[in-house]
Amino acid sequence: MVRTFNTHNIRKQQELTGKYWDFSPCVGKYAGEHFKVATPCCWESHPKFAGYRGEGEYTTTFKTGGNIRLEFKGISHTAEVWLDGRKIAKHYNAYTIFDAVCTNLSYGEHTLTVRADNRFSEKSALHIPNDYMSYGGVSRPVVLEQISDVYIRNVHVTPYKADGKWKAKIEIYLENTKDNKYGDKDCFKINETENISKNNRYVPNGENDIKNSENRSVDVLVNVAGENLIIKNIDAEKNNIVKAEMEFDNINEWTQETPELYYIEVKLLRNEKAFDDLIDRFGFREIKASGKEILLNGEKIRIKGVCRHEDHPQFGCALPFAAIAADIELIKDMGANSIRTSHYPNDEIFLDICDEQGILVWEENHARGLSEENMRNPNFEPQAEKVIEEMIPAHYNHPSIYIWGILNECASDTEYGKECYKKQFDIIRELDTSRPCSFASCKFKTDICFELPDVVSYNIYPLWYHDTEPDEYLDDLYKWVQNETKGVGKPFMITEIGAGGLYGYRNNYDSKWTEEYQAEALRKQLTAVLGYKDCIGVYIWQFCDIRISDEWFGTRPRTMNNKGIVDEFRRKKLAYNVVKEIFNK
């Protein structure tokens, strides 16, 4: 399953996953042997590879020809891709989309091989031993598309209200295949320190077979909410961004209570005949940071949320639709209205469901707990910045995403760290001015970066890592932000709070790690945060218990982060009903 709705009516699209692929580990006891595995998957879900760290090759075949585009929704955590023995793409990071366009492909059967690698090394600045698991494999769908010489890569819709009417800025990103100049030996030059993926071309015959070469112009037809707009004679000789604005009557706004969604359908035409299309969804809503509040369509929002990792004991990070939907139903039943994607961009299916269910999403790029030394890795800046550059264009239209986050608990108390934060916020604001941005800090009274984000956000753990009462700790922290930092006057929220609890563990003195202690700590924490008038909301750490990297923190019980409100099997702890009671007040 690729999305929860159809994204093409004209362009032929086929999911290559959703079936068995051949898997072969590259090292270890089973190196060179071949296994049938159901995709998408993490190889850790296979009984023989639960603890495997290394490279593994996934192989499948398909029949097609002509111009094709292969889209990879997520390979964990580095990928090299071959088509018929030729390398066509290389990509770093498990959680963002990349693609490869291949032109003039001969008709017949073709072999696709993906080599995934979940090893840690100096080449990887983001995937490091950490308080969550870095899985390996083809963990999100792979899609094959038939394209023409010109095709629609993306469309962005930015709704806004002016003079009492809803309007929308529309940007349509066109690409063509005419400039493929790569030779037969090397598809592209690879710089090992960079994340190179966009528009990697494979031309088997070294030239293009472009139809309609005498007519390189196209018309663009846009349909939104029953309104049509046609833009004539767009030059297709080069990649192009087509911009337009539209105005609408009788629009239903996207709200948390009534999450109304609208489709935008874009078609490319020649001689009045459509030859390519792209369909996406969006909602008519505006998000603004205003004073000490965040406003959704002009109304204050109050965040009652949970942090959630993509992690499941049966599926690893490759959760299928039903498992994702079940998580969201539990979160809604708990009374939560928002989810923070910890600590990376999430699967599109998750975002689609949040759009449909009216769940607000804090989505962030990929980095957690990096010290200044970690951030001085020469690969850190290009890799972290590339995540932003891939995350925002891919997820721009999701109305559920109300804020972009970066660099959870990184070196925001250092001058070097501040430079990195500034560069990343600059990239966000270049790509999207319609949403606020923030970062989650854990630097108590030492953070120097609060002039940079639109929202000040803190991770705090009173009654867990220290015994301070939550109301005292929060008040002390907030007054410091207002009186001694450049975060004064901005919206303020708590992005992590919680305590550990082992499912089924209880004793007569309610010690730490018991379900009783976790439940009581959360009662005090949430009561303090939600009762603080200058705090716009809270995210509990975390929804479910998760597996962590074996190399990272051996003192965590069960080699798990056990602060979930439910355990890894989604069994409710005592804290679940406490949270439900408080969130539903």
Image: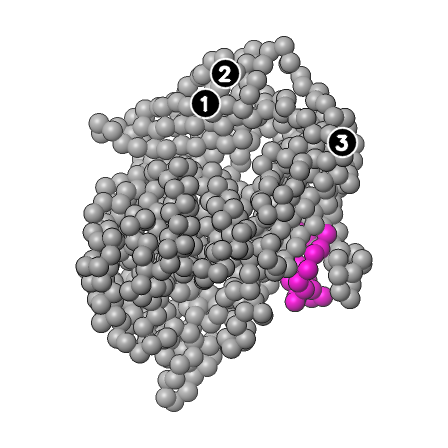
Position in image of residue 29 (x %, y %):
78, 66
Q: CA distance from mark 3 to mark 2?
A: 32 Å
- Nearer-N-terminus badge (3/2): 3
Task: Residue type at mark 2: give it.
Answer: Ile
Residue 184, disc: 3
Position in image of residue 557 (x %, y %):
51, 77
Check the picture and name the quadrant holding the C terminus: bottom left
Q: Which residue is mark 1?
A: 242
Q: Is residue 534 visible?
A: no
Q: Secondary structure at mark 2?
A: strand
Q: Residues within 10 Å of mark 2 (few under 14, many from 20)?
A: some
CB-based contact (under 8 Å), mark 2 and mark 1: yes
Q: Residue at x 25, y 53 (%)?
A: 487
Q: CA distance from mark 1 to mark 3?
A: 33 Å
Q: Residue at x 22, y 59 (%)?
A: 484
Q: Which residue is mark 2?
A: 234
Q: What residue range appears in magenta?
A: 38-57
Q: Nearer the viewer, residue 536 or 357?
A: 536
Task: Residue type at mark 1: give it.
Answer: Val
Whether residue 229 is situated above or below residue 403 in the rendered picture: above
Q: Residue at x 79, y 32 (%)?
A: 108
Q: Is residue 321 left or right of residue 332?
A: right
Marks counted in the figure total: 3
Q: Secondary structure at mark 3?
A: loop
- Nearer-N-terminus badge (2/1): 2
Q: Is residue 564 visible?
A: yes
Residue 430, disc: none
